[in-house]
Each structure stands twice: as C-alpha cells, then as structure tokens.
Amino acid sequence: MSSSNEEKVAHDTVAHAEHTHHLDPKSNLVASASAKLANPLRGIPYNQLMTDVEIFAQERGLEDIVDELKKGALVAQDPTALDHHDAFTEEDKRVLRMEVTHKWTQTKSLYYMVFMSSMAAAVQGMDEAVINGAQIIYPAQFGIGDPNSKRDSWLVGLINSAPYLCCAVIGCWLTDPLNRWLGRKKTIFITCMISFLTCIWSAFTNTWWHLFIARFFLGFGIGPKSATVPVYAAECSPAAIRGALVMMWQMWTAFGIMFGDLLDVAFYFVPNKHNATGLNWRLMLGSAGIPGLIVCSQVMFAPESPRWLISKGRYHDAYKELCRLRLGTVQAARDLYYIHVLLEAENEMKRGRNRVVEMFTIPRNRNAALASWIVMFGQQFCGVNVIAYYSSNVFVSSGFTQASALLASFGFGLINWVFAFPAVFTIDTFGRRNLLLFTFPCMAACLLITGFSFWSTSDTHKLAGVSLGIYLFGVFYSPGEGPVPFTYSAEAFPLYIRDIGMSFATATTWFFNFLLSITWPSLVLAFKPQGAFGFYAAWCCVLWLLILLFVRETKGRTLEELDQVFSIPAHVHAAYGLRQIPYGIKKWVFRQNVEPENLYTFESEDSSVVDEKGQRELREDYEKAS
C-alpha cells in the first residue's frame, strides 16, 4: 500500500471511530477540523448512539425528552431512519416527509422571525434611501451646495457616507461582543433603537458638521444589525429554504429603499414654517426612524436563535425555541442534538487559538473569507451605491427637474424591490454563484448605456437613455448581486467564527460603500458621468472574473457540507473556473450537448481533490497539542 493510501485509510479510520462524545480531545481536534465533518454521526452503531444520547440528556438536564432525542439522533444520523425503526409515530413520519414534499409549510413562529428580519431590513433600506432626496436640498441651507466646488462636493459625500464610515471602522466589529453578551434578538432591538434615535437627531441638525455627527452615530445601528439579522435568519431556518429566507434581508432592504424614495417624493413639497427651515428634508431623514421603533416593539416576541442558546448552555430553552420553529418535536430534537454534536466538534478545533487569526490561517476559513470579501466588495463596486444615494443628482444632471428626479429615483427603488422576488425561488435552485455570473455582464452593459447616454445631443434621448440604463441595471442587480452577498456570507463561515466572519464581510461592504459614496461627486466632477459610469462597468467585468475563479457554490448543501466545499484549495477551484469558460461557450453559444464538470465531492464519494496543505497543517496542530 502506498504512503498516501495509508494516510487516507488512517484518516478515515480515525474520522469514523471518533464520533462519540467521550473521546480523546487531541484526536478529536484532527477529526473535527477535517473536511470529513459533513455528518459526524455517520457510522456510529445503534447501541452506541443511544448510549451517547442518554449521557447527553443526563449532562444537560434533558431526561424528560430523552425519547424524542433518541428519535432525533436517528434521523440526524440517517434521514431514512424513519422507514426502518419502530420508534417513529405516524405523525413523526408525516412531519419529516413534509420537509421534502412541502418545504414552504413551516410554523407561524418561523415566519414571524422572517417578518421581524424583514422589518429590520426595511429600517436599513430607509436609512440608506432618504438621504438620496435630502442631499439635493440640505447642502444649500448649510452653505455647501456649490456643484462646481471640490470642497462642497467632498463635504456632501462625507455627510452622506458618514454612517458607513462608522460601520467599517467601529460598528460592524461590535457584532461579536453584542451577540455574545445579548444574543440575536436583543442585538437587533438595540440597533433598531439606535437607528430610530439617530434618525430623529438628524432631523434637528442645523450645521453640516452636526448632521455628519448624527449620521456617523447612525452607523452604530446599521453595522451590527446588518451582520446580525442574516446570521439570525440562517441559524433559525431549515436547510431546504435557508437561502430564500436569509435573502429576505436584501429584498426588504430594497423595499426600504423604495419606500424611502417614495417618502422623498412626498415630503419634497412640504413648505417651510416660520420656525422650521428645510422642513422637507428634515421629515425625510426623521421618517426613516419609524420602522426601527416598530421593530423594537415586536422583536422580543420572536424566537431566539437556538444555536446561541446552546452556546450558552441553555439547552432546554433552545429546545423550546426549536419547537416554535419546527413543525414537530422530532424535528426539534433532531436539530438540538445535531447542533450540539457539531458545536462540540468545533469547540475542539478552536481550543487555544485566536479566532481572528484562524479565519485567515486555516485554508477552509480563508477560502470562505476570500469568497465573502469578493461578493461584498462586488456589491459596492458594481455601482449600485451610486444609484441608491445619488440617482436624484444623476437624473437632475441628465435634464430632469428636482421633483421629476425624485420620482424617477422612486421608480428605481420600485424596480429594485419587485425584481428581488424572483431570487426567492432561484437562489436555492439556480444557485448563488450562477446568479452572479449571469447578472454581472448584464449590469456592465446597463452602466455603459447610462454613461453613453450623456453624450447624446438630444435631451429626449439623453433622458430616455439614462432612465433605461438605470432601470435595467436594477432589473439585473436585484435578483443577483443584491440578495447574494449577505446570504452567502451568513452561511460561508463555520459556526465558531460566524459572528467574526460576518463582521469582516459587512465591514468590507460598508468600508467601500463609504469610500465610493464620498468620492462619487468628485469622480463626476473630474471625469463627467460618462467616465464615472464607465469606471463601474469595467469593475463589473473584473468582478465577474473573480467570482468565476474564487466564489464557490453553496446552494443545496447543509452548513456542514460547506466545510468540504470551502476545503477545496483555491488554485484548484480557480482552474475549475477557467475550464468553465470553454464549457459555457460550447453549451450556450454553439449549443453543444456537453457534460458539466462536478468539482464538489462529499463523504460518500471517492474524492480525488484533497487539500494536502490543510491536512498537513492539521497534523502539525495535532502534534503540537500532543
């Protein structure tokens, strides 16, 4: 037998044998960190599994539900167990089969959680959108409204992007401590309350620097909320519809943007009062806080994340919440036991390590961080932030009146929301990566249409071209780069670094949001709208290539199976991406019948793709632990 085969056999033997709770922790370090973590219960004999469940129930004070836990462990080990074990009732079988046949039939509590997440997302969207209308009014009142002044352009950009500066440098990095201390629900409550208070504060400012400070503090509401809500939804959702439920964050953020644009139109015509100058833009900014107050009054009635409760040792509370989130107790018991087993495995992997360092030093985590960074970076460099925050200025510069520009911006917001609905059904079928690869070239073409339209000598053609380009951009952005980044980042990282990973991902998007928001007025001043839109079109092409090479597909896999997806070395995946180019040309251009290459292989398959560097690092960790 060759040396490599001996290592493979030895590795598989260890991974198979060390699935119980009472193993040598140093050996478990190797097993749990490996790409064979797809199902740590697989291969355990029936009697041993039942003994493990009884011990688990005694240690966690769950003796009253031990029978349900045993059935749950059997299903967690093998989803077909209900067909060859007498322990399952007809009701158990009906509920478990409905997971496959009626995946959208879920509990009211789960959909209430989705509703609360959606409302929190609407808060986010309104916070982002109302400045679009206000920024064509307040600069003149604050003495920074000269469109030909570089200083004024920079100050307007600084005020508009102030929340995202806070998110990037402080706000997002508060996600981990807030979630560890308070949990998901209370973190959402606090951040929505901050959004409410700072929006009201913004409406009462009288100088540009005062407005900058108020909007900077708004970042303490936006940053942790944008990282917490998608993770909260991912941890509560069933695997079959996880993508669709997590993407509600972006879909209802789009709704908030649309509604914020609508309020901009409605409040634009509000006249000044004798003691209130600029009442229209003040109402625009203040109105964005109302949804945050609604969330604060309702979110504490939603279920808490069972995974967070388990991490705090509150197993009974976690079981109660799972019973609220699942249709039957057998599902709740299955998920409770399975989450516990996975957390135990990951606890062994993280002993004695710094989680931030580990996010970049372990290949599996580094690959997830790179892919999340690319999709988050892409969300800003695709050009959407410019349209979301400055579309009213773009429309004015193309010939619209201010009122017409605000109405046209509302049209973009409406399209952005309506065309997010198709992603609910395509994100778990067509796939995250495929959506991005299809929509990015289309977005680049739309940006070029918008930019070239500014060269038109006909006012009518210019208005029509700019509107067409921006609206078509929304059509392709909304089901692709709109919902995918936050969904992707919420599921890409392993559980033990998910909060930190999501903080890193959201800090990325908000940093570049700030950078591009502050520079857009100066970019237009220096290169005209034609050059500015061409700049973003070029970036869309670059991002398409980065997605092709380094972004892995996550649809249709459990969070545990994603350990294997991200364990494939980056250079192997990049080579696979390059091979997809001739495949795509043959299939979609020449319409040839070609078989797609399947890169992702799993425990039950004989994989020839092995991350040897990652395995070597694991062996070194084991030797150090020994």
Image (tube, rainbow, N blue to C red):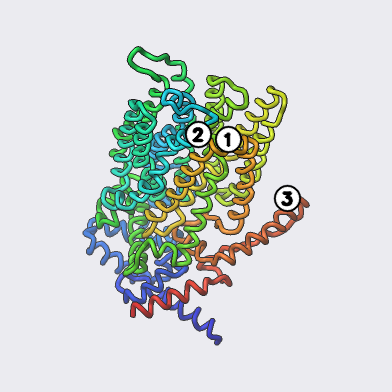
Q: Residue furthest bottom?
A: 1
On the question of residue 38 being in view, the answer is yes
Q: Residue furthest right?
A: 590
User: Which quadrant would residue 353 be assigned to in this image?
Assistant: bottom left
In the depicted structure, whether residue 82 falls above or below residue 454: below
Q: Residue at x 54, y 72 (%)?
A: 610
**Circle 2 residue:** 153
- Decide if residue 206 is on the left or right side of residue 414: left
SS class, disc 1: helix
Q: Residues within 10 Å of mark 1 (few under 14, many from 20)?
A: some
Quadrant, the C terminus: bottom left
Q: Residue at x 52, y 44 (%)?
A: 380
Where residue 588 is drawn, which disc sits there? 3
* Amino acid type, callout 1: Leu
The answer to which of marks 1 and 3 sits earlier in the sequence is 1
Dot in front, 1 or 3: 1
* Amino acid type, callout 3: Trp
Q: Residue at x 52, y 56 (%)?
A: 371
Q: CA distance from mark 1 to mark 2?
A: 9 Å
Cβ atoms at labels 1 and 3 below 8 Å apart:
no
Nearest the viewer among 108 and 425 is 425
> x, y percentage for residue 302?
32, 40
In the depicted structure, whether residue 511 falls above or below residue 217: below
SS class, disc 3: helix
Dot in front, 3 or 2: 2
Q: Residues within 10 Å of mark 3 (few under 14, many from 20)?
A: few
User: Which quadrant would residue 198 be assigned to in this image?
Assistant: top left
Cβ atoms at labels 1 and 2 below 8 Å apart:
yes
> x, y percentage for residue 286?
36, 27
The answer to which of marks 3 and 2 sits earlier in the sequence is 2
**Circle 1 residue:** 525
Where residue 339 is drawn, which disc sits there? none
